[in-house]
Amino acid sequence: MRILSLGSLLLFTYLLCGAQTTLWSQFFSWVIAPLLWINLVVYLTIERPTYIALAHIYCVGLIVSTFTAMPLGLLLLTLFLLFWSIHFIRMRIYWQGSMYYAFMCFIGLSAYQIIFYLSSHLFEANSTGLLFFDRVVQILITPLFSFWMYSVLKKLDFWFRVSGPELEGIEL
């Protein structure tokens, strides 16, 4: 079942990235596209055991890398730092439900924007611009999709029984 679960998450990632890069620009080209895949990274971080989540997030990163001009090494470093940032918060503040997930999506996307900007300036010769307005709009729009994504991801977990006894005993 874990293989099917991972496969469904990767397919969902591919669909999210496709919708973000093609459909969004066709219908809402006047608004910057939300980073929907960040919501998936946040979900994996708060709902999966640590090492399984990190492995899944790296798989998500490989798919996302085909939809972006961001170098793979920088993307994986950013995802690694984002994972541990969210994990740190989750270990101190946690409650179940979609409101917590939306809150963590907001925090996660804010952290992602900061981590990406700083990492780009540290490791790239041609680093990213500040793009303040675009980043703020993404931070405000992306968590709005978290309520829909939370229900979809919970259904996928239920269908593939991800939170069942096979994960018991794995360190969170």
Image (spheres, rainbow, N blue to C red):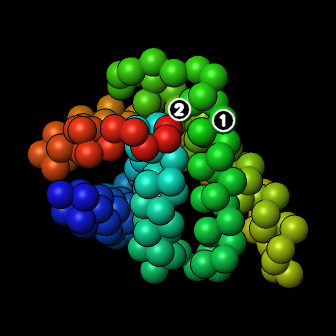
Q: Is disc 2 placed on a helix, strand or loop?
A: helix
* Res 29 seen here: no
Between 96 and 114, the residue placed more toward the observer is 96
Q: Is residue 41 left or right of 16 when viewed as pictured?
A: right
Whole-percent x, y for residue 23 in the image: 30, 64
Residue appearing at x 18%, y 57% in the figure: 1
Choose top left, top right, bottom left or bottom right for residue 12: bottom left
Residue appearing at x 71%, y 59% in the figure: 116
Whole-percent x, y for residue 62 in the image: 47, 75
In the displayed structure, 132 sits above or below 19; it is above
Type of the residue with mark 2: Met
Residue appearing at x 45%, y 18% in the figure: 95
In the displayed structure, 73 sits above or below 171; it is below
Mark 1 crowd level (few <14, some 14–19, many ≥20, 10 Å Cα)? few
Residue appearing at x 60%, y 28% in the figure: 91
Q: Is disc 1 placed on a helix, strand or loop?
A: helix
* Res 147 seen here: yes
Whole-percent x, y for residue 171 in the image: 49, 41
Res 17 label: none
Whole-percent x, y for residue 103 in the image: 51, 27
Choose top left, top right, bottom left or bottom right for residue 162: top left
Type of the residue with mark 1: Phe
* Mark 1 or mark 2, whichever is nearer to me: 1
Choose top left, top right, bottom left or bottom right for residue 109: top right
Comes first in the chain, label 1 or label 2? 1
Rounded to the nearest angstrom, the CA distance separating label 1 from label 2 is: 12 Å
Between 78 and 6, the residue placed more toward the observer is 6
Mark 2 crowd level (few <14, some 14–19, many ≥20, 10 Å Cα)? many
| Residue carrying label 2 | 104
| Residue carrying label 1 | 88
